[in-house]
Amino acid sequence: MTYRTSLLLACLLLSTAAPDVAAQQPATATSAASASALDLRRMQPVSGDAQAGAAKAAVCAACHGPQGVAIAPNFPNLAGQSATYLYVQLREFHDGRRSDPVMTGQAAALSDADMRDLASYYAALAPKPAGRADAASRGAQLYLAGDPAQGIPPCQGCHGPTGLGPQPHPSSAPQPPWATFPHLRGQSSLYVAKELGDFKSGARAGSSNAKVMHGIAATLGDDDVQALSTYLSTW
Protein backbone atom coordinates (compact mmCIF):
# COMPACT_ATOMS: atom_id res chain seq x y z
CA MET A 1 0.00 0.00 0.00
CA THR A 2 1.43 3.40 -1.00
CA TYR A 3 1.72 6.35 1.36
CA ARG A 4 -0.86 8.30 -0.66
CA THR A 5 -3.27 5.36 -0.64
CA SER A 6 -2.96 5.19 3.14
CA LEU A 7 -3.82 8.87 3.40
CA LEU A 8 -6.87 8.51 1.17
CA LEU A 9 -8.08 5.52 3.15
CA ALA A 10 -7.77 7.59 6.30
CA CYS A 11 -9.90 10.28 4.68
CA LEU A 12 -12.47 7.69 3.67
CA LEU A 13 -12.71 6.48 7.23
CA LEU A 14 -13.33 10.05 8.37
CA SER A 15 -16.35 10.22 6.08
CA THR A 16 -18.14 7.19 7.53
CA ALA A 17 -19.04 8.54 10.98
CA ALA A 18 -22.41 10.09 11.79
CA PRO A 19 -22.73 13.77 10.80
CA ASP A 20 -23.21 16.71 13.10
CA VAL A 21 -26.79 17.77 12.37
CA ALA A 22 -25.92 21.35 13.34
CA ALA A 23 -23.64 21.57 10.32
CA GLN A 24 -26.72 21.41 8.05
CA GLN A 25 -28.81 23.99 9.93
CA PRO A 26 -28.86 27.80 9.65
CA ALA A 27 -26.15 29.49 11.66
CA THR A 28 -26.83 30.77 15.16
CA ALA A 29 -24.51 32.73 17.45
CA THR A 30 -25.15 30.72 20.59
CA SER A 31 -22.53 29.80 23.15
CA ALA A 32 -23.40 26.13 22.60
CA ALA A 33 -22.53 26.45 18.90
CA SER A 34 -19.20 28.06 19.75
CA ALA A 35 -18.26 25.21 22.05
CA SER A 36 -18.26 22.44 19.43
CA ALA A 37 -16.57 22.01 16.06
CA LEU A 38 -18.58 21.61 12.88
CA ASP A 39 -18.59 18.00 11.71
CA LEU A 40 -18.01 18.20 7.95
CA ARG A 41 -17.63 14.50 7.24
CA ARG A 42 -21.00 14.33 5.47
CA MET A 43 -21.51 17.99 4.70
CA GLN A 44 -24.02 18.41 1.88
CA PRO A 45 -23.17 20.78 -0.99
CA VAL A 46 -24.21 24.38 -0.39
CA SER A 47 -25.74 26.65 -2.98
CA GLY A 48 -27.10 30.19 -3.04
CA ASP A 49 -27.91 33.08 -5.36
CA ALA A 50 -24.63 34.27 -6.90
CA GLN A 51 -26.26 37.38 -8.33
CA ALA A 52 -27.59 38.34 -4.92
CA GLY A 53 -24.16 37.60 -3.49
CA ALA A 54 -22.54 40.03 -5.92
CA ALA A 55 -24.75 42.81 -4.57
CA LYS A 56 -23.69 41.95 -1.01
CA ALA A 57 -19.94 41.72 -1.68
CA ALA A 58 -18.99 45.42 -1.75
CA VAL A 59 -17.57 45.35 1.77
CA CYS A 60 -15.73 42.09 1.09
CA ALA A 61 -13.97 43.62 -1.92
CA ALA A 62 -12.05 46.01 0.33
CA CYS A 63 -9.84 43.09 1.44
CA HIS A 64 -10.53 40.27 -1.01
CA GLY A 65 -10.53 42.38 -4.19
CA PRO A 66 -13.32 43.16 -6.67
CA GLN A 67 -12.79 39.80 -8.42
CA GLY A 68 -12.03 37.73 -5.33
CA VAL A 69 -8.23 38.05 -5.59
CA ALA A 70 -6.88 39.59 -2.39
CA ILE A 71 -5.42 43.09 -2.42
CA ALA A 72 -2.78 42.28 0.25
CA PRO A 73 -0.88 39.08 1.14
CA ASN A 74 -2.45 38.71 4.58
CA PHE A 75 -5.89 38.13 3.02
CA PRO A 76 -6.93 34.94 1.19
CA ASN A 77 -8.07 34.73 -2.42
CA LEU A 78 -11.73 33.69 -2.55
CA ALA A 79 -12.34 33.42 -6.30
CA GLY A 80 -12.93 29.86 -7.45
CA GLN A 81 -13.19 28.33 -4.00
CA SER A 82 -16.12 25.95 -3.64
CA ALA A 83 -19.31 27.52 -2.32
CA THR A 84 -19.46 24.86 0.37
CA TYR A 85 -15.98 25.65 1.68
CA LEU A 86 -16.65 29.40 1.73
CA TYR A 87 -19.99 28.94 3.46
CA VAL A 88 -18.38 26.79 6.15
CA GLN A 89 -15.73 29.42 6.82
CA LEU A 90 -18.34 32.18 7.13
CA ARG A 91 -20.31 30.00 9.51
CA GLU A 92 -17.25 29.40 11.65
CA PHE A 93 -16.63 33.15 11.91
CA HIS A 94 -20.33 33.83 12.52
CA ASP A 95 -20.67 31.21 15.24
CA GLY A 96 -17.37 32.00 16.97
CA ARG A 97 -15.63 28.77 15.99
CA ARG A 98 -13.01 30.73 14.08
CA SER A 99 -11.67 34.11 15.12
CA ASP A 100 -10.25 37.05 13.19
CA PRO A 101 -10.12 40.77 14.10
CA VAL A 102 -11.96 41.72 10.91
CA MET A 103 -13.98 38.69 9.84
CA THR A 104 -15.55 37.97 13.22
CA GLY A 105 -17.34 41.31 13.15
CA GLN A 106 -18.18 41.17 9.45
CA ALA A 107 -19.71 37.69 9.63
CA ALA A 108 -21.69 38.37 12.80
CA ALA A 109 -24.20 40.47 10.88
CA LEU A 110 -24.75 37.93 8.07
CA SER A 111 -27.86 35.78 7.78
CA ASP A 112 -27.65 32.19 6.61
CA ALA A 113 -28.96 33.29 3.19
CA ASP A 114 -26.30 36.02 3.03
CA MET A 115 -23.55 33.47 3.65
CA ARG A 116 -24.89 31.13 0.99
CA ASP A 117 -25.22 33.94 -1.55
CA LEU A 118 -21.74 35.33 -0.91
CA ALA A 119 -20.21 31.86 -1.06
CA SER A 120 -21.93 31.15 -4.37
CA TYR A 121 -20.82 34.48 -5.82
CA TYR A 122 -17.14 33.96 -5.06
CA ALA A 123 -17.29 30.33 -6.18
CA ALA A 124 -18.47 31.54 -9.61
CA LEU A 125 -15.45 33.85 -10.11
CA ALA A 126 -12.36 32.74 -12.02
CA PRO A 127 -9.47 31.74 -9.73
CA LYS A 128 -6.18 33.61 -9.76
CA PRO A 129 -4.19 32.74 -12.92
CA ALA A 130 -1.52 30.08 -12.50
CA GLY A 131 2.05 31.13 -11.82
CA ARG A 132 5.40 29.42 -12.44
CA ALA A 133 6.29 27.42 -9.37
CA ASP A 134 9.54 25.47 -9.10
CA ALA A 135 8.49 21.88 -9.71
CA ALA A 136 11.80 20.63 -8.29
CA SER A 137 11.52 22.54 -5.02
CA ARG A 138 11.10 21.14 -1.53
CA GLY A 139 7.62 22.71 -1.48
CA ALA A 140 6.62 20.82 -4.63
CA GLN A 141 7.92 17.57 -3.12
CA LEU A 142 5.93 18.08 0.06
CA TYR A 143 2.76 19.04 -1.77
CA LEU A 144 2.82 16.22 -4.32
CA ALA A 145 4.58 13.39 -2.49
CA GLY A 146 4.93 14.38 1.16
CA ASP A 147 7.87 13.10 3.17
CA PRO A 148 7.21 9.62 4.61
CA ALA A 149 10.43 9.73 6.64
CA GLN A 150 9.07 12.70 8.59
CA GLY A 151 5.46 11.49 8.62
CA ILE A 152 4.34 14.29 6.28
CA PRO A 153 1.47 13.26 3.98
CA PRO A 154 1.15 14.70 0.45
CA CYS A 155 -1.09 17.77 0.41
CA GLN A 156 -2.55 16.76 -2.92
CA GLY A 157 -4.31 13.86 -1.21
CA CYS A 158 -6.99 16.31 -0.06
CA HIS A 159 -6.28 19.50 -2.01
CA GLY A 160 -5.84 17.95 -5.45
CA PRO A 161 -2.86 17.48 -7.78
CA THR A 162 -3.38 20.91 -9.36
CA GLY A 163 -3.94 22.74 -6.07
CA LEU A 164 -7.51 23.56 -7.08
CA GLY A 165 -9.19 20.90 -4.97
CA PRO A 166 -9.57 17.20 -5.68
CA GLN A 167 -12.15 15.54 -7.88
CA PRO A 168 -14.14 12.49 -6.76
CA HIS A 169 -12.74 9.30 -8.26
CA PRO A 170 -15.02 6.58 -9.70
CA SER A 171 -15.68 4.17 -6.87
CA SER A 172 -18.52 2.53 -5.00
CA ALA A 173 -16.77 3.23 -1.68
CA PRO A 174 -17.71 6.22 0.50
CA GLN A 175 -15.71 9.31 -0.39
CA PRO A 176 -14.76 12.41 1.60
CA PRO A 177 -16.79 15.61 1.11
CA TRP A 178 -14.38 17.14 -1.41
CA ALA A 179 -16.20 20.48 -1.49
CA THR A 180 -15.14 21.28 2.07
CA PHE A 181 -11.41 21.23 1.17
CA PRO A 182 -9.98 24.59 0.01
CA HIS A 183 -8.11 25.38 -3.17
CA LEU A 184 -4.55 26.34 -2.22
CA ARG A 185 -2.83 27.27 -5.48
CA GLY A 186 -2.00 30.96 -5.70
CA GLN A 187 -2.60 31.83 -2.05
CA SER A 188 0.06 34.17 -0.68
CA SER A 189 2.94 32.66 1.26
CA LEU A 190 2.14 34.94 4.20
CA TYR A 191 -1.43 33.70 4.40
CA VAL A 192 -0.55 30.02 3.99
CA ALA A 193 2.14 30.21 6.66
CA LYS A 194 -0.25 31.98 9.04
CA GLU A 195 -2.95 29.34 8.61
CA LEU A 196 -0.53 26.44 9.02
CA GLY A 197 0.70 28.10 12.20
CA ASP A 198 -2.86 28.42 13.48
CA PHE A 199 -3.51 24.75 12.78
CA LYS A 200 -0.27 23.77 14.49
CA SER A 201 -1.05 25.81 17.61
CA GLY A 202 -4.69 24.73 17.69
CA ALA A 203 -5.92 28.31 17.25
CA ARG A 204 -7.94 27.19 14.24
CA ALA A 205 -10.10 24.32 15.43
CA GLY A 206 -13.66 25.06 14.35
CA SER A 207 -14.32 22.01 12.20
CA SER A 208 -13.49 18.34 11.77
CA ASN A 209 -11.25 19.30 8.84
CA ALA A 210 -9.30 21.62 11.15
CA LYS A 211 -8.83 18.75 13.59
CA VAL A 212 -7.24 16.69 10.80
CA MET A 213 -4.99 19.60 9.91
CA HIS A 214 -3.72 19.80 13.50
CA GLY A 215 -1.97 16.47 13.09
CA ILE A 216 -0.62 17.30 9.65
CA ALA A 217 0.70 20.74 10.65
CA ALA A 218 2.44 19.18 13.64
CA THR A 219 4.69 17.22 11.25
CA LEU A 220 5.92 20.40 9.53
CA GLY A 221 9.01 22.24 10.67
CA ASP A 222 9.50 25.96 10.05
CA ASP A 223 11.52 25.28 6.89
CA ASP A 224 8.80 22.99 5.55
CA VAL A 225 6.12 25.59 6.19
CA GLN A 226 8.19 28.17 4.33
CA ALA A 227 8.84 25.78 1.44
CA LEU A 228 5.17 24.90 1.07
CA SER A 229 4.05 28.51 1.40
CA THR A 230 6.49 29.68 -1.26
CA TYR A 231 5.54 26.87 -3.64
CA LEU A 232 1.82 27.52 -3.36
CA SER A 233 2.17 31.28 -3.71
CA THR A 234 4.18 30.99 -6.94
CA TRP A 235 2.11 28.18 -8.44
Image (spheres, helix red, strand yellow):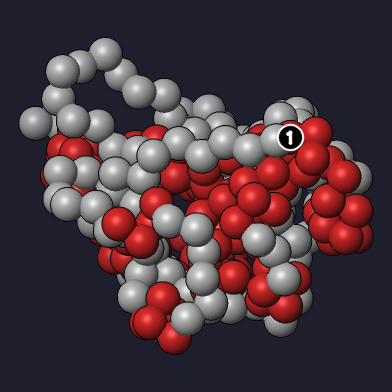
Q: Tell me: residue 64, above or below residue 180.
A: below
Residue placed most toward the observer, 44 or 113: 113
Say left or right for 61 vs 108.
right
The location of residue 163, given as percent across then percent down, is 54, 35
Residue placed most toward the observer, 58 or 169: 58
The location of residue 105, given as percent across then percent down, is 72, 78
| Residue pictured at 41% horizontal, 76% vertical | 33
| Residue pictured at 43% horizontal, 30% vertical | 166
Q: Can residue 63 be seen in this view?
A: yes
Within-10-Å neighbours for mark 1: few <14, some 14–19, many 20+: many
Q: Toward which corner of the image does residue 175 lie, by quadrant?
A: top left
Q: What residue type is labelled 1?
A: Ala
Q: Can residue 232 be seen in this view?
A: no
Residue placed most toward the observer, 114 or 156: 114
The location of residue 212, given as percent across then percent down, is 30, 59
Q: In which quarter of the image is the N terminus?
A: top left
| Residue pictured at 26% horizontal, 13% vertical | 170
Q: In which quarter of the image is the C terminus?
A: top right
Q: Which residue lies furthest to the top in this view?
A: 170
The location of residue 102, given as percent across then percent down, is 75, 76
Q: Which residue lies furthest to the bottom in this view?
A: 31
| Residue pictured at 88% horizontal, 60% vertical | 59
Helix, strand, or loop for circle 1? Answer: helix
* Location of mark 1 (residue): 50
Q: Toward which corner of the image does residue 194 lie, by quadrant?
A: bottom right
